[in-house]
Amino acid sequence: MEEKPSLLIIGNSNVGKSSITKLLLKDASAFKGKIGKNPGSTLLIKPIIQKNMPYQIVDLPGFGYAKGSSQRREKHIKDLIVTHIEKNNDKYFYCLMVLNILRIEDEIKKYHIKNLKTIPLTFELISFLKEFSISILIIINKIDKVTNLEKKRIINLFITTAKLYNLHLIPINEYNENNIMEIPYLEFSAVKKTNLGILKKNIDQLL
């Protein structure tokens, strides 16, 4: 049987990757992935395939923020992800990189503002994915957890800092696919299903 095109979902632990995966499935009740407040619960790299879906989903293991995980385990997960993308990048028609809006500011402060010798992992990962010319959509999840004012401030900080790493983030409704320098982002809430229709339409257009 011919393999279906693959949608890659990637991000830190507990950002909502499994919840978003469930929202995209035709038959969510058949999904056996763990969803909840259990950081680092998704450990295997196995495509999620359903008969009535034109593509399959690969939800990569979460990394960072996993409670009680050792540095050795975190390095193993990161190495696993890097190796997987290096070997399978040609199979992916789209990558959803999921971020938790509640963590963006902390990451930038810790790995950019307070330590200029380091790079926030989010930006490092985006740059890595771009090397393989994989189409990327940044999903800024959990916007229901902040006020509109806080949301705007955090996203502006994210965009401004990204530019310092030569990453040009732009709202998905302003994105020009002919401009290879631009990376679209979508404000999202898996709980409230905010902008789910836009996400599904965007995926269908890239298939």
Image: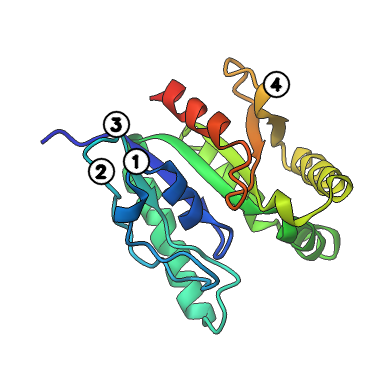
Q: Are marks 1 and 2 in contact (CB under 8 Å)?
A: yes
The answer for how far apart the CA atoms under marks 1 and 2 are is 8 Å
Return the residue at label 4.
Answer: 174
- Element under label 1? loop
Q: Residue at x 39, y 48 (%)?
A: 85
Other residues around mark 3 within 10 Å, as few (<14) / some (14–19) / many (≥20): few
Residue 114, compared with residue 163, is above or below; it is below
Q: CA distance from mark 2 to mark 4?
A: 32 Å
Residue corresponding to mark 1: 26
What residue is drawn where x is 61% and y is 36%?
195
Q: Is residue 89 above or below residue 110?
A: above
The tag earlier along the polypeptide, 1 or 4, is: 1
Asked whether the residues under the numbered discs 1 and 3 touch, taking CB atoms below 8 Å apart as contact, a structural biologist would say no
Identified by mark 3, the residue type is Pro
CB within 8 Å, label 1 to label 4: no
Residue 123 coordinates in the image, percent (x, y): 65, 48
**CA separation, marks 3 and 2?**
8 Å
Q: Which mark is residue 54?
A: 3
Query: Quick check: 152 above or below 173?
Result: below
Amino acid type shown at disc 4? Glu
Look at the image and tell me in which quarter the N terminus lies.
top left
Q: Which residue type carries mark 2?
A: Gln
